[in-house]
Amino acid sequence: MDARQLHQRLRGLGDPTIAEHSQRFFKTAKGEYAEGDRFLGIRVPVLRQQAGEYLHMPIKQLLRSLRSVYHEERLCAVLIMVLKYQRGSDVEREAIFQHYLSNTQYINNWDLVDSSAYHILGPHLEYGDRHPLYRLARSDSIWERRMAIISTLYFIKKQQYEDTLKISLELLSDPHDLIHKAVGWMLREVGNRDLNAEQTFLARHYQKMPRTMLRYAIEKFPEKQRKAYLQGRV
């Protein structure tokens, strides 16, 4: 199995109608966040199936696929990386972790980040120094900043909220809507498990939060409480 074979397989599965829709959905026009990205037109369940079939692709070939100009090839590559990480030895996991961090410029859309960051970065940093997440949070790259906050979903599921809250604070004044959504989503995930932890954070910071971030964070609150937050009356 090699990158050329995967490329040929995915090209054969592409659908021009789906590709055209994806070009619009993922904001690929000039000046948009995914400017110039190219699509083959393949649904995610199909890519997950292909990832399973190409699980044993050598890492050098996998990295070639990760650097493809086609969105679906890159997504398939990160899905394979996740599978390799989950099934690998400690040595193999360390290699996947390092390759992931060394190739973040190719993990360059929200679906690629969300499908991989908390499956690789989160578990790898669970018992070690989590400084790499804070470096990502301070990056000029929107995708690295999104990796930082999305990775903490792994910790949230372990009832560990400190890094989510600290990174949320780091990103509180981020200019990009996709970061606002990601931070609000993670704060909501904290609240799903520990409402007091989320509300304590909101009490200190909600008046400075971008509107979208706040809306995502309080999405599951009772309507009266949501209105109070949005009107600044909490």
Image (cartoon, grey):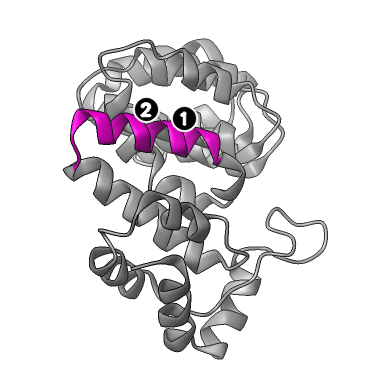
Name the side, left or right, on which 210 lies relative to 149: right
User: Do residues under tags 2 and 1 come within 8 Å of each other at their CB atoms?
Assistant: yes
Could you give the CA–CA distance between mark 2 and mark 1, rounded to whole angstroms? 6 Å
Residue picked out by circle 1: 149
Give amino acid for label 2. Answer: Thr
Residue that appears at 41% across and 21% down: 164
In the rendered image, residue 131, in percent from the top left (x then y), is placed at 47, 12
Image coordinates of residue 53 in percent, x first then y, are 24, 69
Seen in the image, is 155 located left or right of residue 110?
left
How would you rate the neighbour count of disc 1 (Cα within 10 Å): few for under 14, some for 14-19, many for 20 or more? many
Is 221 on the left or on the right of 228, as rendered?
left
How many numbered discs sit on the rendered protein? 2
Q: Can residue 44 be seen in this view?
A: yes
Q: Name the residue under label 2.
A: 152
Note whether 166 is above or below 58 in the view shown: above
Camera-side residue: 141 or 227?
A: 141
Residue furthest right in the image = 30
Residue 211 shows which numbered tag?
none
Three-letter amino acid code at the position of disc 1: Ile
Range of magenta residues: 88-103
Is 15 drawn above or below residue 10 in the view shown?
Answer: below
- In percent of width and height, residue 87 lies at 17, 44
Horizontal side of 47 relative to 149 (left or right) equals: left
Image coordinates of residue 124 in percent, x first then y, are 30, 26
Q: Magenta stretch containing residue 102, yes or no?
A: yes
Q: Would residue 222 be counted in the magenta stretch? A: no
